[in-house]
Image (spheres, rainbow, N blue to C red):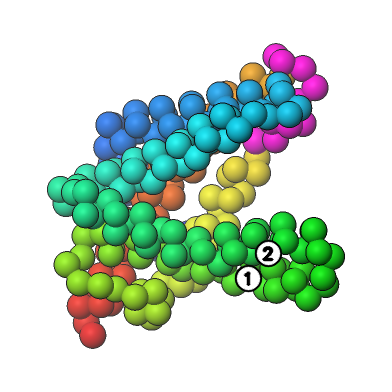
Amino acid sequence: MTTGLGSPKFSQRVLAEVGAFPRKGIVYIGLVCAAAQMCNLLLWSKADASTVIYVILAAILLAWFCVSYATASAILNVPPSVSGLFKFLAASLLTSLPVLLSLALLVFASKTSIAIIYVLSGLLMLGGVFLLPLLAGWPITQAISTRLIGPMTALRATKGHRGNLIVAALLVAGLNRIVPALNSATDFTTACWFAVMGFIADIASAMALISIAVVASQMMSANLVRK
C-alpha cells in the first residue's frame, strides 16, 4: 500500500528527515524565506521595481543554495566545505539549465515572434520540469562525492524511485499553491497577511524539499555503489 509520497519506505524516510530537521537549518531557512517575502512586498508596492531589488533577490537565491547545501550536509553528517559548495552549485545550475534556457528562448521569441522558438522553449521547459525532481538528489550527491558524477549517471541511479520523486515534487508544488499570490492583494494589510502565509509555506516547502533531496541522494548513492 502506498502513501502520498509514493512507496511507504520513501515516504517514511522523508517524513523522518522532516521530523529530525536540524534547528539551525530551520533558523537559516526562516531568515532566507523572510528576506524573500520582504522583497516580494517591495515588488508588490512598486510597479516599476528597481534593479537593486532584483540584485537582492539574486543574492537571496544564492543564500538559499548555500543554506540547502549546509543543511543537507548536516543531516548526512558530512562536514561542509568550499569545494563541496561549488560542486553543489554547479550541479544545481546544470539541473536547472533546461528551464533557464527555456526562459531565455521565451524572451528571445517575444522579440522576434518566430514560432519555432516558442515550440523549442516549451519543449525545453517540459523536459526541465520533468528532470528537476528526478535529479533532486544529484547536487548533494555530487557535493559529497570524491568522483565526478555526470547527469546521465545520476539519472540512471534514480531507478526504482523515480515515481516517488515526481509525486513528492507535485505535492510540494501543491503546498505552495495553497497560499494566495502576493500580487493578488488589493491593499497593504492583505499583502502583509499573504506574505506571512507565504513565509510559513516557504519554510514548510524548503524543509520538505531538502528532506526529499537528502533521501534521494541516499538512494542514488546506494544505486551507484551497486554498479
Task: Tell me residue 39's x, y (percent).
Answer: 57, 27
Marks 1 and 2 in Cβ contact (< 8 Å): yes
Query: Which dot, 1 or 2, sits closer to the camera?
Result: 2
Residue at the (56%, 67%) spot, across then down: 98
- Magenta range is 179-189
Residue 187 part of the magenta-drawn span: yes
What kind of residue is marked 1?
A: Leu
Residue 112 part of the magenta-drawn span: no
Residue at the (23%, 85%) spot, across then down: 227
Looking at this rendering, what residue extends furthest in the bottom direction? Answer: 227
- Give the numbered dot on residue 145: none
Please name the residue that numbered disc 2 is placed on: 105
What kind of residue is marked 2?
A: Leu
> In the image, is residue 63 above or below residue 15?
above
Please name the residue that numbered disc 1 is placed on: 124
Q: Is residue 167 left or right of residue 112?
A: left
Choose between 18 and 128: the one closer to the eye: 128
> In the image, is residue 92 above or below residue 116?
above
Q: How many numbered marks appear?
A: 2
| Mark 1: few/some/many CA within 10 Å (<14, 14-19, 20+) | many
> In the image, is residue 168 above or below residue 189?
below
Q: Is residue 6 something that shows in the picture? A: no
Choose between 153 and 111: the one closer to the eye: 111
Residue at the (59%, 64%) spot, across then down: 101
